[in-house]
Image (cartoon, helix red, strand yellow):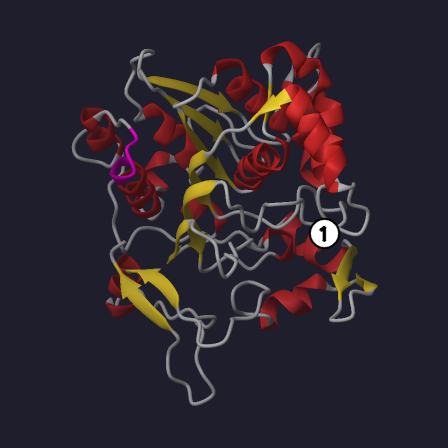
Amino acid sequence: MARDLVICCDGTGNQFGDRNSNVVKLNDCLVRDKTRVLHFYDPGVGTFGLQEALFEWQQIAPRVAGLAFGWGYRSMVERGYRFIAENYVEGDRIWLFGFSRGAYIARVIAGMIHAIGLLDPAHLNLFEYAFRIYERSAGDDRLPIATRERFARQFCRSAPIHFIGAFDTVKSIGWFIRWKQLPWTMNNPSVKFFRHAISIDERRCFFRTNLWRNGAKAKTDVRELWFAGVHSDVGGGYPEKESGLSKFPLAWMIAEAEQAGLPIDAKRRERLLGKGGRYAKPEHNAQLHTSLKGAWWLAEYLLPRRMIYVDENKRRRTYWVWLPLLESQWIAYPRGMKPGPNERIRIHSSVRDRMSDPALEYAPVNLPKDEDGWPLYDFVDR
């Protein structure tokens, strides 16, 4: 009997506790039947300190390293990839969910599976070597295709990705890591369904979103939907009583996954969506948080970032940006990326309800418009 292998990668600094992200909540909704569903949850980058650290203060340095440099992200990729490789048999369906950098890691795992396949369980000791081959499967320093194919033929097996569910994917692993896209993370022919819930109101430059870009011949079923709120209003992580906005993307993602065949426990779903009990329910007038405050203001002004672009002649150009806040204020759509020709974005209907509520005075300035001021977006339920 074919099974569903579900990988849940949490966001930066997120882990199971009293402020659970939507990744934890989605994982909680899965049917508990090991003959049908095998699920794996991994806390986010920056949550694990040294193993011998017994006290919270001892983990501060490792956490900062995780947040600033992405320390630990490779281990997250390996753990998720290893779980799939150890359990996958032909016919199983692979599901990858993630929030923030965890969403990017989910896309990296899928990219690696597309590039080289799944290592045979007996050859998982070759993960580091396999990851280096994956990193060089595209770009200026790419390996010859024959090298990758020989490795895959000898040590790996192919496997399709059934579904990726991403909550507000960010564009980089760490603040100081070069802004380099790993192969097959912006599109991936091996992915059948891609769903992405995106924040409208996030302004921090270090949390730029990472949209999917299907090729002309791509067969991936893609839906990217924008929601009101900042990064963690979409991916979750605030106290439960302040989580009303995050329940809209959670409900949408669960519905999309269930429609694609994911076994969901209906009672758990209803409980988490506030149909009785202590959990918040989706409300358009729920609290919208502010993420650009405190130390984040200092980071926006003072932390330099190196940005590498490739121009139309495939020449690499490097820019040092010393005042990212100046960018975040003015590069509006979508949080640092330009719209394509005749492109319209899809916005969840709860945003329209919030904009129509006179008591809230909610009017996001970064919704795209054409040269004449007409909106380039549509309100949808799914």
Say few, some or many: other residues with alpha carbon within 10 Å of mark 1 (under 14 / 14 to 19 / 20 or more).
some
The chief SS type of the magenta part is loop
Taking the image as shown, residue 320 lies to the left or right of residue 279, namely right
Q: Nearer the viewer, residue 193 or 360?
A: 193
Place of residue 345 in the rendered image (x, y in percent of width and height, measured from the top left): 40, 66
Q: Nearer the viewer, residue 308 or 359?
A: 308
Q: Amino acid at mark 1?
A: Trp
Residue drawn at 70 percent across, 42 percent down: 174
Place of residue 175 in the rendered image (x, y in percent of width and height, measured from the top left): 71, 46
Q: Is residue 239 visible?
A: yes
Place of residue 225 in the rendered image (x, y in percent of width and height, measured from the top left): 38, 56
Q: Nearer the viewer, residue 255 or 4?
A: 4
Q: Which residue is mark 1?
A: 179
Taking the image as shown, residue 257 lies to the left or right of residue 267, namely right
Q: Which residues are magenta?
A: 258-262
Q: Quadrant of the N terminus?
A: top left
Circle 1: element type: loop
Taking the image as shown, residue 96 lies to the left or right of residue 252, namely right
Give the answer, above or below, for where 311 lies relative to 182: below
Residue drawn at 45 percent across, 55 percent down: 199
Residue drawn at 46 percent across, 35 percent down: 161
Give the answer, above or below, for where 192 lies relative to 308: above
Quadrant hosting residue 348: bottom left
